[in-house]
Image (cartoon, grey):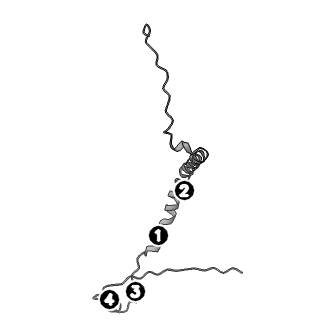
Amino acid sequence: MRHDTIAFFIELNGGNPNARTLLASTREGQIPEIPSEKGTLAAILEMLPKLLEKFSCIENPVKKVVTDIGAVTSDIKENPTLLFKGPKAKTAPPERSAPGHR
C-alpha cells in the first residue's frame, strides 16, 4: 500500500499594528483575502534547479582537483621529505657558445 504525503509551508510575517483590519479594507460584497508573496522557502525551492545545474557544471573540474590533491598527498605520505624540498627546477637547455668563441 502506498501513502503519499504532501507538505505545505505557510510563512506568516507580522503586519503593522496601525494598519486597517482585513475586514475593514475589503470592499462590500467581496471576500476578504490576504495577498500572498513568495516566502523564503518557496524562493529557495524555486532556485534549487538552477543551483544544481551550476554545481553539475563544476563537478568534473572539482573531481580533477580532488584527484590531483589525492595524488600529491599519496606522494607526500610515501616520502614526507617532499615537504622540505622546493618545486622541481626546470632544467634550462645547455648554453651554446657563439661560433669562434670558447
The percent coordinates of residue 75 (x first, y second) are 59, 44
* Quadrant placement of the N terminus: bottom right
* Mark sitting earlier along the chain (1/3): 3
Q: Distance between the residues labelled 1 and 3?
A: 25 Å
Q: Do the residues labelled 2 and 4 touch (CB within 8 Å)?
A: no
Residue 45 x/y as whole percent: 49, 70
| Residue indicated by mark 4 | 25
Residue 56: image quadrant is bottom right
Residue occupied by mark 2: 56
Secondary-structure class at tag 2:
helix
Task: Inspect the image, locate mark 1, and give the three-letter code of the amino acid beneath it.
Answer: Ile
Query: Pointer 1 and pointer 3: residues touching (CB < 8 Å)?
Result: no
Amino acid type of the residue that numbered disc 2 sits on in the rendered structure = Ser
User: For the residues carrying marks 1 and 3, which lies nearer the camera in this image?
Assistant: 1
Residue in view at x 55 percent, y 54 percent: 59
Q: Are marks 3 and 2 in contact (CB under 8 Å)?
A: no
Residue placed under numbered mark 3 in the picture: 33
- Where residue 26 appears, as percent x and y from the top left, is 34, 89
CB under 8 Å between discs 2 and 1:
no
Numbered disc 3: secondary structure: loop
- Distance (Cα) linking label 3 and label 4: 10 Å
Residue count near mark 1 (Cα–Cα under 10 Å), binned few <14, some 14–19, many ≥20: few
Q: Which of marks 4 and 1 is nearer the N terminus?
A: 4
From the image, tell me which residue sits under label 1: 44
Q: Is mark 4 on a helix, strand or loop?
A: loop
Residue sitting at x 40%, y 86%: 33
Whether residue 81 sits left or right of residue 40 in the image: it is: right
Q: Nearer the viewer, residue 26 or 74?
A: 74
